[in-house]
Image: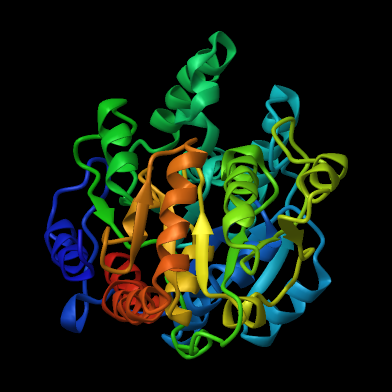
Amino acid sequence: MTLSDASIAVGRSASSDQAGAAPLAAGPAGRRPGRQHIVVIASLTRSLVIFRLELLKAMVAAGHRVTALAPDDDADAARTLAGIGVAFQRIPMARTGTNPIADLRTMASLYRTMRSLSPDILFAYTMKPIIYGGLAARLAGVRRRFAMFTGFGYMFGSEGETVSGSALRWLSVQLYRRALVGASAAFFYNDADGEDIRRHAMLGTGTPMIPISGSGVDLDLYERQPIPPGPPVFLLVARLLREKGILEFAEAARALKTRYPQARFQILGPFYESPLAIGRSDLQRLQTDGAVEYLGETSDVRPYLSASTVFVLPSYYREGIPRSALEALATGRAIVTTDAPGCRETVIDGQNGVLVPPRDAGALAAAMARFLEDSALAVTMGARSRRLAEERFDVHAINRVLLGALEL
């Protein structure tokens, strides 16, 4: 689905009848008159700055009042939001976990907040904000409610095949259905997520589904950079989770290091609290033979992308569209990633990168070897990556689609 296709979908959706939505008068060019109060709910405060900053700026620039809600105390993020004219309030919400008492407390707090703020529009993204924010907004009488599915993660991943995983998925689907009754529209990142939303009937038939190309990337902030001279560097950027393909990357690196000792294989990303996480002791073992280098974590990935030759993400996690891959595209790096939902959207196989089967270290090694055997490949594919970023993933173009659907 191209960005132009998404824009067409927005045009179709704007004229669709919406179950439970009363008609509202529109001004010139289809805009609703007057200043709107928009509440944006996130499950991580930092994500409002990392993923939504340009969207929030655009809402404020259009003359609307914006209040952002998120659970964690992040002073830097709060200052950044205040600097662009966005009010911020903390809400009680466990980003992960399934404690029903805690989740009820979250919904009750959100209901009180909605009653107090009386917003015109709710815009919620990720699971708990969509579910509990949506339910609270329904109860509080917020008439225009929008949900953005940024990826289903474990819900439709390998954990969903277990008995407990299947039960959790069933419960999640029921909650989505109730939260999204009468929703104005829902956005999704990739075809697999769209199919799951339809198959599990999470939305009413009157709610438009609008495809968008992920969170997008700021092409001015992430400028195209030349491939650096010297030994080739393969860079993996991700949270340190097994499902991001960390172990497969290390196995492929060990196999290639014996044949191409000059090559470097680097991992950049934070540790993460999860049963599926790569721990510090695990990471130390992966580095013992010198095949893999761990670079730590950073708030600015651009110098590391600039110093790399090829970006690698062997994830088998149910990604939406991984932001790290979009940043690599904009920098002008060839992509080696898996033929898995979300990841595959960033690669035209054989043109700007290579798709490999998930969980296949041998195929991953073979794909990376192509760049070691042909040094010009990273240059030509990297140039195509930048063009793909410009054509499909420009954050400002994506935000125009979102603002058009919200009629802002």
| Applied colour scheme | rainbow
| Depicted 178 relative to depicted 30: above or below | above
Residue 144 horizontal/vertical position (percent): 37, 55
- Picture residue at 69% right of the left edge, 37% below the top: 96
Relative horizontal placement of residue 401, taking residue 279 as reference (left or right):
left
Quarter residue 308 falls in:
bottom right
Confirm whether residue 408 shows in the render.
Answer: no
- Picture residue at 47% right of the left edge, 48% below the top: 364
Q: Nearer the viewer, residue 233 or 107?
A: 233
Relative horizontal placement of residue 120, taking residue 72 as reference (left or right):
left
Relative horizontal placement of residue 75, taking residue 317 as reference (left or right):
right
Looking at the figure, which quarter contains the C terminus? bottom left
Residue 43 horizontal/vertical position (percent): 64, 51
Quarter residue 280 falls in:
top right
Residue 186 horizontal/vertical position (percent): 33, 49
Confirm whether residue 80 shows in the render.
Answer: yes
Q: Nearer the viewer, residue 33 or 315?
A: 315
Looking at the figure, which quarter contains the N terminus? bottom left
| Depicted 191 relative to depicted 48: above or below | above
| Depicted 157 relative to depicted 401: above or below | above
Residue at the extreme top: 163
Relative horizontal placement of residue 190, taking residue 371 as reference (left or right):
left
Residue 230 horizontal/vertical position (percent): 60, 83
